[in-house]
């Protein structure tokens, strides 16, 4: 059975390859360790976004299209479409602002903000690997997706854009252990922080000691922290032992598309001009002069 | 009757050299890996997709170490790192360690002719690789990651390899002539 006692020349011949394998493994391990520093890890982001663009963004990429110049024309069309989309957003905003102005003039009352227009994209890649739970959508900066955009599907909140390419976006799902979403109960109004559990249900932390959720009530985003808009449906809350768990509504109605809306913009408060108070003249001041 | 006619007909695959086999295996890994990136739900059931690069690592390692498979495994590892959003180098380590372990087992035992070793060694290698993946992911993500998807992927990886293992059999080391093969 055993194939021991090989010739010495064979093992000598193999040793450089073993050395090469060892060097490769050592280099990869060093690379992994080096990425514990966020600065070094962020150095690989351009590579990740470029590869993401290739996997998620280019749908009709073929050699024939490249040879005939069709690919270039299609790219130009996509750019123009993105520009039109961008301009149509401004148009919508202008119409909305005009309407608001009219309303102010008529009733002198404040109107609510119009809903932001989003970009709908197809989910082109997803993985259920052991690392961060992410999906790749085939729309990026060129289509008007913004960094930190909020992704939704028919069911509700899906996640947040963590990496933005030219034609693709990587979305960190709310089911991931490392995602944190400030939420509140629709009926109870109890606030908590939601994160992904290992069993497919969401877990809640930072709950108030006295108040409790109502069994089966809907969980919405609370907009605390400013990363998500208020009122997006996240799921339903359930009591599981002593803990409250959240059944994600996005998982129930996953049609393979996501809408990415711009993240809420928190306007920095304007600093008031501080009046400089001149110091009162001391009794000795005049004597010196 | 001539001597050649008495021989059984050799298949096209058995006449193929290690380099075309290596390229064909790499193409299969790339194709299956890319297919795995697409949403994989059928009638509401999610399919656990195999880690195709491990087939290459285990299969190619059975004839011993060589630089070309190592380079291919590094490339596949880097692509996996990007697609799985893992720190760059994780899957490279995994693929290379599986490859090295496969070569080490092949060096010690006759993996081609001993049925027990031929069955046990891939099971051991895949299990070890997935255990290492779980350990790396749990360490780097700062929490114990889910085991069930990994076990499901381990099952599919092992089952598909049981069917397709010939595709990842190089026969002999790339560049080695027929008589030199051990």
Image (tube, coloured by chain):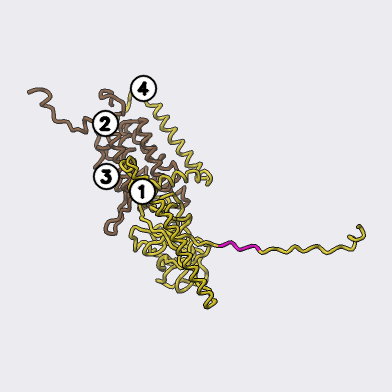
In this view, the residue in front, A36 or A41, is A41
| Mark 3 on the same chain as mark 1 | no
When the figure is inspected, residue B149 is found, relative to residue B89, above or below; the finding is below
- Write the residue at 79% across / 63% down: A278
Q: Colour of chain A?
A: yellow
Residue neighbourhood size for the residue with mark 1, other residues' Cα within 10 Å, grouped as few (<14), some (14–19), many (≥20): few
**Magenta segment range?**
A267-271
Q: Chain of mark 4?
A: A
Position in image of residue A283 (x %, y %): 89, 63
- Report if the CB atoms under discs 2 and 3 are less than 8 Å apart: no
- Looking at the image, is mark 2 or mark 4 nearer the viewer? 2
- Report if the CB atoms under discs 4 and 3 are less than 8 Å apart: no
Supply the letter of whichever chain is brown: B
- Label 1 sits on a secondary structure element that is helix
- Looking at the image, is mark 1 or mark 4 nearer the viewer? 1
Residue neighbourhood size for the residue with mark 4, other residues' Cα within 10 Å, grouped as few (<14), some (14–19), many (≥20): few
- Write the residue at 34% across / 60% down: A254
Position in image of residue A97 (x %, y %): 50, 68
Question: Quick one: which residue is furthest to the left in this view?
Answer: B1
Task: Tell me, for residue B160, which label it has, or none.
Answer: 3
- Report if the CB atoms under discs 3 and 1 are less than 8 Å apart: no
- Looking at the image, is mark 4 or mark 3 nearer the viewer? 3
């Amino acid at each position: 059975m055993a194939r021991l006692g090989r010739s010495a020349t064979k093992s000598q011949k193999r040793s450089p390859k073993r050395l090469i394998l060892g060097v490769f493994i050592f280099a990869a391990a060093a690379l992994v360790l080096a990425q514990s520093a966020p600065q070094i890890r962020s150095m690989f982001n351009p590579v990740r976004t470029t590869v993401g663009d290739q996997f998620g963004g280019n749908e009709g990429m073929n050699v024939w299209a490249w040879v005939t110049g069709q690919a270039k024309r299609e790219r130009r069309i996509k750019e123009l479409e993105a520009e039109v989309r961008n301009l149509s957003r401004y148009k919508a905003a202008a119409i909305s602002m005009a309407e608001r102005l009219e309303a102010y003039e008529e009733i002198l009352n404040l109107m609510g903000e119009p809903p932001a227009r989003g970009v709908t994209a197809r989910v082109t890649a997803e993985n259920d690997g052991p690392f961060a739970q992410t999906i790749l959508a085939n729309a990026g900066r060129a289509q008007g997706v913004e960094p930190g955009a909020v992704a939704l599907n028919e069911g509700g909140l899906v996640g947040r854009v963590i990496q933005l390419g030219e034609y693709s976006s990587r979305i960190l799902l709310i089911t991931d252990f490392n995602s944190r979403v400030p939420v509140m109960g629709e009926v109870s109004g109890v606030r908590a922080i939601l994160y992904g559990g290992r069993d497919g249900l969401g877990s809640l932390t930072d709950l108030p000691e006295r108040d409790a959720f109502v069994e089966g009530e809907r969980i919405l985003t609370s907009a605390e922290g400013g990363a998500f808009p208020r009122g997006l449906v996240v799921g339903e809350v359930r009591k599981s032992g002593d803990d409250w768990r959240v059944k994600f509504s996005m998982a129930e109605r996953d049609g393979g598309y996501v809408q990415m809306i711009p993240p809420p913009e928190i306007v920095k408060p304007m600093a008031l001009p501080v009046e400089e108070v001149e110091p009162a003249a001391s009794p000795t001041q005049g004597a010196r002069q | 009757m001539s001597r050649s006619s008495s021989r059984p007909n050799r298949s096209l695959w058995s006449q193929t050299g290690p380099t075309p086999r290596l390229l064909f295996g790499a193409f299969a890994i790339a194709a299956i890996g890319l297919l795995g990136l697409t949403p994989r739900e059928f009638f509401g059931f999610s399919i656990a997709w195999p880690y195709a690069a491990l087939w290459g690592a285990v299969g190619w390692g059975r004839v011993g170490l060589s630089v070309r498979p190592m380079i291919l495994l590094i490339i596949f590892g880097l692509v996996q790192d990007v697609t799985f959003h893992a720190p760059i180098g994780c899957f490279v380590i995994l693929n290379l360690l599986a490859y090295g372990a496969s070569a080490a087992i092949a060096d010690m035992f006759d993996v081609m002719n001993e049925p027990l070793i031929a069955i046990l060694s891939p099971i051991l290698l895949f299990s070890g690789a997935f255990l290492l993946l779980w350990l790396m992911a749990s360490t780097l993500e700062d929490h114990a990651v889910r085991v069930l998807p990994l076990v499901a992927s381990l099952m599919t990886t092992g089952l598909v390899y049981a069917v397709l293992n010939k595709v990842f059999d190089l026969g002999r080391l790339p560049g080695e002539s027929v008589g030199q093969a051990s």
